[in-house]
Amino acid sequence: MKQRAQFATKIGVIATTVGSAVGLGNIWRFPYEAGTHGGGAFLMVYLMCVFIIGVPVLCAEFVMGRGTHKNVRGAFKQLHSSRLWHFCSYTGILASLMIISFYSVVAGWVLEYFFQAISGTLTDPTAASHASTRFSAFCSSTFRPVMWTVLFLAINHLIVSRGVQKGIERVSNTLMPMLAFILVALCINGVLLPGAAEGLTFFFLPDFSQITPSVILGAMGQAFFSLSLGLSCMLIYSSYFSDDVRLVRSATTIALLDTLVAVLAGVIVFSAVFSYGVQPEQGPKLVFEVFPSIFAEMPGGYVWAVLFFLLLFFASITSTISMSEISIAFFSEEYSMSRNKAAVISTTIAVVFGIICALSFGVLSDLTIFGMTVFSLFDFVSSNILLPVGGVMFSIFVGWFLDRTFLRNQLTNNGSVKVYTFKIIVFLMRFIAPTAIITIFIYGLI
Ligand code: PFF
């Protein structure tokens, strides 16, 4: 049998999984979700979701992936004979294809901004003062958003069809720390803006009256999205881990780093939102309207803007690579397809739906289903429905149906490491995560 690929180093393990987790979810989606859901209240519920639900579900995916070194369906097949469980693989595949479709649109916007940054229009003070109208005009147009979406998917395709581990690992190792550095600089710049204090209060001080079922559902969906959970992305990545990787420690590190990036993004965006008098409830357009003003007024803004959008592009591509890996590993390992053919299938689906999503802000804005455009529908259905459903499945499967010794051996590396939180993690996985997800899900949807 062909030797299956493995990540080469421990740092590589963290850099690639964090590379998957950190992306537009942290810098684009988190601030606008927090903005529409009451700021501090959202942040508080979000943090609880990450640590009470996210970490145990992440451990569950790791146990299945690293324990079997297979794709999601292969893992279920190896671990259980019931066909019902094998069927669970499909929600993840569907979610990954939906997410990659709308995610590429936003990554396309990032590319547009990168080129505007290089040409200097982005930081031109007069253009920046019309950032909001300029952005609306751009994303409701037809040609450019579609062009960038397709270009982004083409780059993603080139990378994933080549067999990725080395590439992903190397890119993630160097670029992720650079992105963190830029975010810290932007944060310092942000808190020094006049009026920033109001933004920080909005973001950090919870107003408990704002906590509604839809805020909780939104926060849970965001936690799943941001940690790349519930669709077997972390499962497939952990199938490339070697046997000495510590699963609980890695899961906690990923959750902490991912949350740190989201919080930094929140500080940057909300300091600016209040300083420039932008409405925090804008939705998906929020950060694209705010960033030009930040860079236009920041000392050295031109260079920061170019670097920032370049790195945001890399952060997006390390995330889409991981999404693509779900369906590619699935098609190639389960149907004995070549990696290339599997990549062509998943890219084709993403291009078709990506174009529809890209046009959702313009010519297709009237095409709505349940009152949502295709873009919003894909986002809502994947993050708030499919990912939590996947999370329940993974936690129940690993917590209740998996052989206890197998679970223990995976979490403790066959007893060679002492995991002080072992009991807590298993308790959260068996009882708390599934009940919390199901309750939030039902309340939120009603
Ligand atoms: N976690 C990524 C982000 O926050 O941008 C998005 C993502 C990646 C979602 C991979 C799902 C996934 F499988």
Image (cartoon, rainbow, N blue to C red):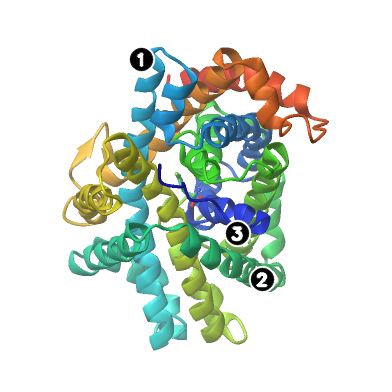
Q: Which residue is mark 2?
A: 181
Q: Residue at x 65, y 35 (%)?
A: 55
Determine whether the residue tagged by mark 3 lies in a helix, strand or loop: helix
The quarter of the rendered structure image containing the C terminus is top left
The one of 156 and 148 positioned closer to us in this rendering: 156
Real-space Cα distance between discs 2 and 3? 12 Å
Q: Which residue is disc 3 drawn over?
A: 265
Mark 2, Cα crowd under 10 Å, few <14 / some 14-19 / many 20+, is few
Which residue is nearer to you in this view: 123 or 344?
A: 344
Q: Please identify the residue farthest to the front as the structure is shown.
A: 1
Instruction: Return the residue nearer the eye: 235 or 123.
Output: 235
Q: Give the Cα separation between the discs numbered 2 and 1.
A: 47 Å
Identify the mark nearer the N-term, 2 or 1.
Answer: 1
The dot on residue 83 is 1
Note whether ligand 1 is within 8 Å of mark 3: no
Query: Which numbered disc covers residue 286?
Result: none
**Which amino acid type is marked by label 2?**
Phe
Task: Please state which of the two labelled residues, at mark 2 or mark 3, is closer to the viewer.
Answer: 2
**In the image: residue 101, left or right of residue 222:** left
Q: Which SS class for mark 1?
A: helix
Going by the image, does 445 lie left or right of 245? Answer: left
Task: Quadrant for the N terminus, please.
Answer: top left
44 horizontally vs 225: left or right:
right
| Visible residue check, residue 230 | yes
Residue found at x 43% / y 58%: 164
Badge 1 or badge 3: first in the primary sequence:
1
Residue 423, percent from left and from top: 77, 22
Quadrant of res 231: top left
